[in-house]
Structures are given as C-alpha cells and as structure tokens.
C-alpha cells in the first residue's frame, strides 16, 4: 500500500483533535469534520495550544509551528471533505448505532482504496466493518488520551480486516511517531479491558467509603507509580466514556464483574463528566 497522503478525521472532540494534530505535525494534510455547533472553533483552539506546548519543548518557534500545523488542517461540517483521503479515522461518540451511521456515510464518499479506521475504545471492529461495503479495509486505530503525548496506538483487526490494511495502519502509526501494538477484536481490546476495571474499582472504593478521592489517587500514584490516580484519569478520559466502555464490557463479555459502579452512573447523570465539564471526581474550575 502506498504512503498515506491525506487523512480525514470524523469527530472534533478530545480524541479527534489529538489525532488530527499528530498527523498534521508529521506533515500530512488533514480534513477534520464535525457537525456539532462550535466544535470546530474549540478544536482549533485546543490544537493550537497543544502544538505550542510541543513546539516549545522541541525548541521550535511556537508561532511558526502553530501556523504550519493549523495550515495543514481543513475544518468542515460535511463528510464530502473525505473524498480525497487515503485514511479516514472516526472518533465520534462511543455508541454502536452512531458509529454504524458514521461508517455508512464515510464509506459512501471515501475513495475505493481508502482505509476506514475507528478510534473506538471498546466496540467490535467487525460489527462496525459490517456497516460498510469494504470490511477488509476497516480496522481499529485506538489512540490514547492525550494523543500528542501518549506513545501507544492499539491496532485491532476485525474478522475480515486484510493483512494489507493492518500493515498500512501499523506504518501510518509509526510515521507519526507512535508505537503500534496489535490486539484482537474482543470487547475493550487489551487497554480498556485492563484499565476500566481498575478505574471502576477505585470508584467503588469512593462509593463504599474505603477512602476519600484524594487518598485513593495518592495510593495509586505513590504506591504503584502511576502518573495520575485512577479517579483523575477517569476525569481525563471522561466519566461518560468510562461508563459507555464498562457497559460494553459487561454486556459483550457477559460478565457482571464489569458492572459500572452506581456512583459512576449518578455522576454521569448529573453531568459531572470530568475535565471537559469542569467537574468530575475533582473540581477543575478551582485548579
Ligand atoms: N499536548 C501537548 N503536550 C501535553 C499535553 C497535550 N495535550 N498534555 C500534557 N502535555 C505535556 C506537558 O506539556 C508536559 O510537558 P513537560 O514534561 O515537557 O513539561 C508533559 O506532557 C506532562 O504534563 P503535565 O506536567 O501537565 O502533567 P503530568 O505530568 O500529569 O502529565 C500526562 C500529563 C502525560 C497526561 C500524565 O498525567 C499521564 O500520563 N497520565 C495518564 C494518561 C493515560 O493513562 N492515558 C490513557 C488513558 S486511556 C485512553 O485514552 C483510552 C480510551 O479509550 C479511554
């Protein structure tokens, strides 16, 4: 497969922004599409802030780097922008019907040879691929948050994903400075099957009064050398995203050991989603 020349990203949320940024930083033109009002303006500002941080660290001019990287990203609200893309990465809400609709729309406009990737955290790539007329070219590219910093891309093959497709996204991940690791198409793959039970158990500890939120996170930071505690990590990922992933794990693996803590459900219902809403297990407005 020839080198990826142009990338499309559907969804300008936290993950979509980061994915667009890393491809554009590596010199690839990117089209970001989102229909949510205001999402694109917010995306531009988030990407600019992050590019500036990366440039400062690399000893480059933040102004020049921000101009160059943003100059490679086209923002729009129509999936027609994916017409010239060799790779389209979907990074929308963690919901199967929404992803099926998104892949039908992308499949209708992307060139015949293009690869369609999903950044899903837990949903079956095989089921997503079945919504398209090109299941051999559909694959999981699961980036980690914050995308500009984290090295891993989990690569997931669906039942019908071709070797050529998997090899192409492995190469594309390396080309943007990431380290690809392959996993099979099981609910939550490796990353979230291991991570989410830990986060859920931390929430149960808070729910049952085992310790306060700060103490739970301190234990995991000081005792296990985690960079941030599990409750702060849930706030970074988004408590709604954590809940959606746990529901997929419980339902699709058929095991109640993945049942989401009632406190997590209550927090999501109350809109305490974490950093993105200013409050979750911790209060970000005050920080
Ligand atoms: N863009 C660019 N640079 C960034 C950044 C961003 N968005 N966020 C942080 N950085 C940089 C900072 O500039 C800083 O650089 P420096 O060390 O040169 O000063 C460095 O990263 C560290 O940042 P901070 O000092 O602000 O804060 P921390 O030391 O706490 O590091 C962190 C931030 C890298 C996010 C660290 O807390 C961490 O590794 N946390 C765990 C992250 C993690 O586990 N992610 C995976 C989540 S699971 C997932 O995404 C899967 C999904 O499906 C749920």
Image: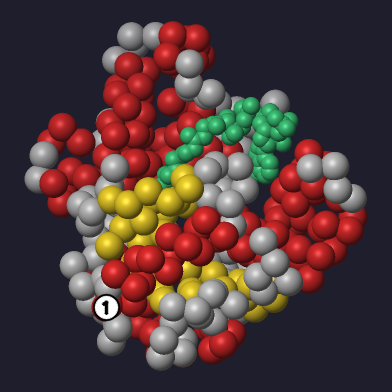
Q: Is residue 30 left or right of residue 9?
A: right
Q: Position of residue 272 (x, y in %)?
A: 49, 38
Against 132, residue 166 (above or below) is above
Which residue occupies 45% across, 34% down? 234
Residue that protrudes farthest toward the left in the picture: 254
Q: Is residue 170 visible?
A: yes
For residue 200, which quarter of the picture? top left
Q: Which residue is mark 1?
A: 135
Q: Is residue 132 left or right of residue 284?
A: left
Against 284, residue 133 (above or below) is below
Q: Position of residue 46 (x, y in %)?
A: 70, 53
Against 183, residue 199 (above or below) is above
Against 287, residue 187 (above or below) is below
On the rendered image, what quadrant is the C terminus found in? Answer: top right
Q: Secondary structure at mark 1?
A: helix
For residue 36, which quarter of the picture? bottom right
Q: Position of residue 171 (x, y in %)?
A: 47, 62
Which residue occupies 34% across, 73% down? 164
Which residue occupies 24% across, 60% down? 124
Which residue occupies 28% across, 51% down? 183
For residue 168, which quarter of the picture? bottom left
Q: Position of residue 90 (x, y in %)?
A: 45, 68
On the rendered image, what quadrant is the N terminus found in? Answer: bottom left
> Does the beta carbon of the residue at mark 1 sit less than 8 Å from ligand 1?
no
């Amino acid at each position: 497969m020839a080198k990826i020349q142009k990338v499309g990203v559907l969804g300008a949320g936290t993950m979509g922004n980061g994915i667009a940024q890393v491809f554009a930083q590596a010199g690839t033109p990117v089209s970001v599409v989102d229909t949510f009002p205001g999402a694109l303006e917010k995306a531009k500002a988030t990407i600019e802030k992050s590019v500036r941080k990366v440039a400062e660290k690399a000893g480059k001019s933040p102004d020049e780097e921000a101009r160059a990287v943003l100059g490679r990203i086209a923002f729009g609200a129509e999936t027609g922008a994916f017409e010239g893309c060799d790779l389209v990465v979907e990074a929308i809400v963690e919901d199967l019907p929404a992803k099926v609709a998104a892949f039908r729309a992308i499949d209708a406009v992307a060139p015949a040879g293009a690869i369609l990737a999903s950044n899903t955290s837990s949903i079956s790539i095989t089921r997503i691929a079945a919504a398209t007329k090109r299941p051999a070219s559909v694959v999981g590219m699961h980036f980690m948050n914050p995308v500009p910093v984290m090295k891993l891309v989990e690569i997931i093959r669906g039942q019908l994903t071709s070797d050529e497709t998997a090899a192409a996204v492995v190469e594309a991940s390396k080309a943007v400075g990431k380290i690809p690791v392959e996993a099979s198409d099981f609910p939550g793959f490796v990353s979230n099957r291991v991570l989410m039970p830990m986060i859920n158990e931390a929430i149960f500890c808070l729910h049952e009064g085992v310790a306060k939120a700060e103490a739970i996170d301190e234990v995991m930071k000081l005792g296990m050398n985690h960079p941030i505690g599990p409750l702060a990590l849930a706030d970074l990922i988004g408590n709604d995203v954590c809940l959606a992933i746990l529901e997929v794990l419980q339902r699709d693996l058929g095991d109640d050991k993945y049942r989401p803590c009632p406190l997590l459900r209550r927090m999501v219902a109350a809109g305490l989603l974490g950093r993105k809403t200013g409050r979750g297990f911790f209060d970000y407005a005050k920080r």
